[in-house]
Image (spheres, rainbow, N blue to C red):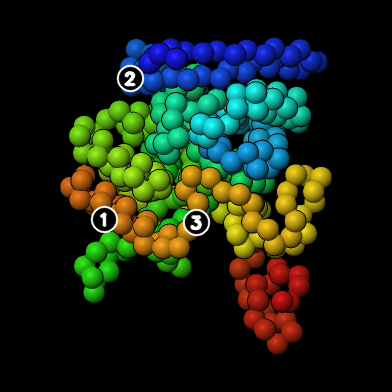
Amino acid sequence: MTTGKVIFIFIAVASSRLFIVFSLRLLSGDHYCDLTRLPSPQALRSDQFTVLINGYSESRIPILRTVTGVYSSSPSVAAVVVLWGNPTTPAKTLVELSHNLSISSPGDAPISVIRQPSSSLNARFLPRPWISTRAVLICDDDIEVDPKSIQFAFEIWRSRSNNPEQLVGLFARSHELDLTSRTWIYTVHPNRYSILLTKFMLMKTEYLYEYSCEGGESMAQARSIVDEMRNCEDILMNFVAANKTGMGPVLVGAKRVRDWGDARNEGVRRRGRGLRAAGEEVAVGLSSRKKGHRRRRGDCIKEFHRVLGKMPLTYSYGKMVDSIGEQGLCEKGGKLVFCDRQTVF
C-alpha cells in the first residue's frame, strides 16, 4: 500500500437500535496535524466525552466486551473507540471484534475499532477529526470502572472552569528529585502526586494536538524517547498539561475499579468471560511491567526534563470524592473507626 493511502472497510448491521459502521484505517503522513481537517474547539460539545481505549493484545479481547459495554452505557459518552496498536493482528479479527462489541453492547454510544497507523504509544494521542467532544477519556483495555465513578470523574472535569485544562484521573504517581544521585525518579507518595496514568485519564481534546503536533523539535525528541522506551507516553502528556496550566492534575476517587491486567490478580476467573485460570497473568501490551519498571520511568522523567528544558510537573494533594459520610470517630470492638462504618475489620 502506498504512503498516505486510506483503506476503509465498512460493515453495516441493522438492528432495532443500532446501525454499526466499522472502519479499518491505515493512515500516514501529516494528516493528523492538519488543522483544516480538525473541528474547531468551539464546535466541540461539552455535555459528553469520547472514550479512546488503547488495545494491543488479542488475549484481552474478552475483557474488552465488558469494558466497552460499561462506557457505552454511560449517558455522558458520545462514542467508544478502541485504538488497536498491534500491527500483526489480522484485519478479519478486528472486523469481527468491532461487530461483536457493537451488537453485544448494552448501551447506546456507538463502539468502533480503528487500527492505529503504527505500534507507537504516541499514536494514542493523535488528534482525530471525528472527535466531536471537548473532552476525551484515554484509558486502557483492562480497566473496569463502575458507571457512577465514570460519571463523577466527568463532572469533576467539567466543574474545573469554563475551559477545563487540568488532567483528571483515577491512578496517581509522582516524580521526585533524589538528593543523593541528584536525578529525577518515579515513585508513589501517600499524600501527594504529580502524574496521572493513562489507565483512566480525562483531558481536553486540544491536548491531543498539542502533544502530537506542537512543541517543535524538543517535543519531537520527547516523543522519540517514548518510542525508544516503549513506555512513558502518559508521563509526557502530564508534562504537556502541567506546562499549559502551571498546576498539578486532579485525582478522583472511584467506588469500584478492577484492573484485569495487574499481575497481583488472584482468585478463580470465570472462563465464560474469556479470562484465564487462577494465578495466570492476563497477557499485557506494549508497555508491560518488567524488571526495573520504576527505574525506566524515572529515566523518562529525566530525559523529558533534559530535552524540554524545564520541569513543569507540579504536586497536587488530596482526592475528589462524591461522598465522605460521617467523619466522627466512635469506639467499636475496642478500635476507633468512623461512626458510619457498620463492620469492624
Q: Label 1: which residue?
A: 302
Kind of residue at badge 2: Asp
**Is residue 69 among the parts visible in the rendering?**
yes
Q: Label 3: which residue?
A: 289
Secondary structure of the residue carrying numbered label 2:
loop
Residue drawn where x is 76% and y is 17% of the image: 17
N-term mark: 2 or 1: 2
Q: Are marks 2 and 3 in contact (CB under 8 Å)?
A: no
- Of the pair 229 and 333, the residue shown nearer to us: 229
Note whether 219 is above or below 181 in the view shown.
above
- The N terminus, quarter of image: top left
- Spot the residue most to the bottom: 334
- The C terminus, quarter of image: bottom right
Residue 304 image point, x, y percent: 26, 48
N-term mark: 2 or 3: 2
Q: Label 2: which residue?
A: 30
Q: Quadrant of residue 28?
A: top left
Residue drawn where x is 64% and y is 52% of the image: 282
Estimate the spatial distance between the alpha carbons at disc 1 and disc 3, rounded to whole Å: 19 Å
Q: Residues within 10 Å of mark 3 (few under 14, many from 20)?
A: some
